[in-house]
Image (spheres, rainbow, N blue to C red):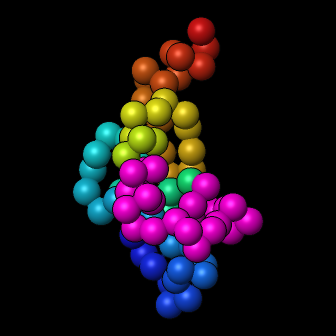
Amino acid sequence: MILPSEYPLKPPNIQFVTPNGRFQVNENICLSFTKFHPENWSPLWNIETMITGLISFMFDREHTTGGVITSDSVKRKLA
């Protein structure tokens, strides 16, 4: 999690630095509480709630910027 100096008034960027099978390494992840969507940002988001949101997204199969596309996810889109 890369917090800007203006945090909590501005959203962070989130990147993974190790392979995990869900997100690309060293790529910003597009989630509603990141810099990709500053219009959705609220200072009520704290580190704990962002991590909880990130964990829940790890189990979601929705594609997002920074996500890894696997043959399994391509099959689901074609079905």
Residue 45 appears in the figure: yes
Residue at the far bottom: name it: 5
Residue at the far top: name it: 79
The residue at 57%/45% (across/down) is: 64
Residue 24 appears in the figure: no
Tell me where residue 78 sits by quadrant: top right
Q: List x then y, in percent, for residue 25.
A: 36, 57
Q: List x then y, in percent, for residue 37.
A: 67, 62
Give the camera-side residue of 31 and 50: 50
Give the camera-side residue of 46 and 16: 46
Tell me where residue 38 sits by quadrant: bottom right
Classify the position of the C terminus by image quarter: top right
Instruction: Check residue 49 for magenta coloring.
Output: yes
The residue at 48%/30% (across/down) is: 61
The residue at 39%/51% (across/down) is: 52
The residue at 56%/54% (across/down) is: 31
Q: Give above or below for 51 relative to 76.
A: below
Q: In the visual, does 78 lie left or right of 50? A: right
Give the camera-side residue of 32 and 52: 52
Q: List x then y, in percent, for residue 22.
A: 38, 41
Classify the position of the N terminus by image quarter: bottom left
Q: Which residues are magenta?
A: 32-54
Q: List x then y, in percent, for residue 63.
A: 55, 37
Q: In the visual, does 49 lie left or right of 62? A: left
Instruction: Check residue 28 for magenta coloring.
Output: no
Residue at the far right: name it: 39
Q: Give above or below for 3 relative to 50.
A: below
Residue at the far front: name it: 44
